[in-house]
Amino acid sequence: MADRADAVRNRARLVEAAKRVFADPARPHGPEAVAREAGVGVGTLYRHFPTAEDLAAAVYEDDLARVADAAAELAAHLAPPDALRAWMDRFAERMAGKRAMIDALRSVLHGEGRVEQTRERLAAGVRIILDRGAADGSLLPDVDADDIVTALVGITVASPADPARAARLMDLLVRGVRAG
């Protein structure tokens, strides 16, 4: 049982270490750097993640879960338009941290239907906020959550080096779905 618990902890440490390593463009991004950051040997990394794509997928899926889950948290504490805008900021922050691993992410996203799964998961999070906004009258009732995700992906891809422009575009998007 202790071996299993150690394996779970090591996997989590590796994912968190990879996030830190990938977020710093000045650092080497190889397996040795990730293992060192996690405080484990390279063999441990390869047992959990045999390829760079496997590690990228784990980091991506962990971040995706956090971004998707943030929608419910934000919807519980903020007015729907504010929750939507705060969620967009979280999404953009996560995307900015993925620039260093973009090649690995491309192969991850284009395999096994992951693009569709990703969009569905993100749209489900956005739908929580949109439904709350439609119910209280602050957001238009006919907004498609997948349209919001598509627009947000476009904003983050088109403005990777210009956060101010991305922020203006996200503000514009929120204004466009406000009711009244």
Image (cartoon, grey):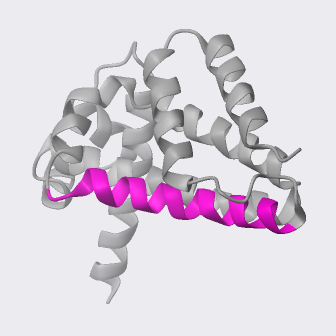
Prevailing secondary structure of the magenta residues: helix
Quadrant assignment, res 80: bottom right
Which residue occupies 40% across, 53% down? 119
User: How many numbered badges does the structure rendering display?
Assistant: 0
- Whether residue 174 sits left or right of residue 78 in the image: it is left
- Whether residue 20 sits left or right of residue 78 in the image: it is left
Q: Can residue 175 be seen here?
A: yes
Q: Is residue 126 inside the magenta stretch?
A: yes
- 143, 156: nearer the viewer: 143
Q: Position of residue 16 (x, y in %)?
A: 44, 48
Which residue occupies 43% across, 40% down? 19
Q: Position of residue 79 (x, y in %)?
A: 88, 54
- Whether residue 98 sits left or right of residue 145 in the image: it is left
Which residue occupies 84% across, 47% down? 179
Quadrant assignment, res 178: top right
Which residue occupies 34% across, 24% down? 100
- Whether residue 55 sits left or right of residue 99 in the image: it is left
- 49, 124: nearer the viewer: 124
The magenta stretch is: 112-135
Q: Can residue 31 be seen here?
A: no
- 132, 92: nearer the viewer: 132
Image quarter in which the C terminus is found: top right
Q: Is residue 25 inside the magenta stretch?
A: no
